[in-house]
Amino acid sequence: MNAFVRLFAMLSHPVQALYRHWLYRQSISISSSAMLHKLFEEKMPRKPLTDEERKLVMTIKNETTRLNRDNVTRTEAYFSFFQRHPEVHWAFLAHLVSRNGGWNMTDLKGSLVPVVVATEQIKPLFLFLERANTLIFHDAYPQLLLYEKSKEQKKKLFHLLPYFSVSAFMQPFWEHFYETKDAPVLTVALIINEQQYIQQRVVQHPFFQEQVIKTFPFLCQQWLGFNDVLIPYKSGRHVRLTGITVRDFADVSHRIEIGKALYGMLFYRNSLFQRVYHFACQTKHTGSRADFWPHIFSKTNDGGRIFSPTLSDAWPVMEHRFPDKRDWFYDLTILHEAERIPLMSHPSLTLHYADNLKKLQKIATATKQAMHS
């Protein structure tokens, strides 16, 4: 079955298949097909809540809502959780990716992007980024808190996951993790789950398809490298960048592979992890790119450096509703994605990103000149 799935993927998405082949030049096995399928053999019936469980569900929902205020609170919540529970690797990965989400949001109100992107396209781009960011937190953070409560109470509480509308895909993985502390398998499961979760609700949503995914600015950003997932890390007194480029955000399989590659890069290269963690500890997330390169970016529009505002200065807090309770998970073929992760040496994106900035500055300058000619 796995061979058939891979063959079908190669025929239907040849570019992504080639990219996957390149990613997996060096990879490691983190689980087997037999082990993964065994996790799903036991049916887990849904039981009525006790009064104590009902209170716990409400407490977790309230805490999730409180911290799901904006990109800054979400990003910090992930990091705080990781510091309390460093065995849950996904929380740190989510923190770093969420930092990138915030930078992309504030770019839309900085001194470069608004010059080259039409005014009417700025708000939809922000809503796209914000909706994906808030949905992932809405789905994932209750899972993290339920694990925390399970540790505190010294008993598994994952039978409560359906009361947060979490996919049935996740309960077997949390049960397995509680018993084994198998961090790679849980991390990849969460990567798969969250990307599938936003695929239905954001990427395939008609509004975002029309207003964002199919627009020229969004496609240009991808192929010019402005959708790079940047991971800053300390190198002496300097902050350098590594990470990976996202070439096809609309493709859920591509995003899953990107997440797995980032995980392998961070957690299987200990020297890099320590330097990235050092940066995260020392650098509070504000949404401004001045957080990592204050010599190039400024949180105020001082006319010298590139203006990169904080999130609170760039965008108001948005109100969100979460009416869609659909479960994306309907068969086991997706499990093959949790068998291996690619191992990449971390590429230096420092010069690459600096070059992309220069390109964007040239485009912005040319656009301004054309507008005034």
Image: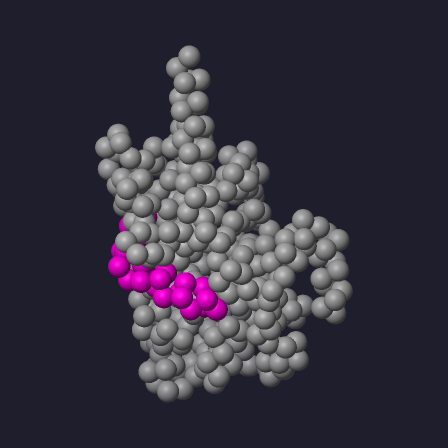
Magenta region, residue range: 266-287
Residue drawn 71% across and 50% down? Answer: 14
Q: Is residue 181 magenta?
A: no
Q: Is residue 367 visible?
A: yes
How far across and how far down the image is residue 303, in percent?
26, 30
Quarter that holds the C terminus: top left
Q: Is residue 108 above or below residue 239?
A: above
Query: Which of the two residues, 213 or 223, is positioned nearer the viewer here?
Result: 223
Query: Which of the two residues, 270 or 81, is positioned nearer the viewer here?
Result: 270
- Residue 1, by quadrant, is bottom right
How far across and how far down the image is residue 176, in percent?
51, 81
How far across and how far down the image is residue 156, in percent?
43, 83
Q: Is residue 31 left or right of residue 127?
A: right
Q: Name the residue at the bottom extreme.
A: 154
Q: Main secondary structure of the magenta part?
A: helix
Q: Is residue 226 left or right of residue 106?
A: right
Residue drawn 40% across and 86% down? Answer: 155
Q: Is residue 152 above or below residue 354?
A: below
Query: Which of the two residues, 14 or 124, is positioned nearer the viewer here?
Result: 14
Residue drawn 44% across and 22% down? Answer: 366
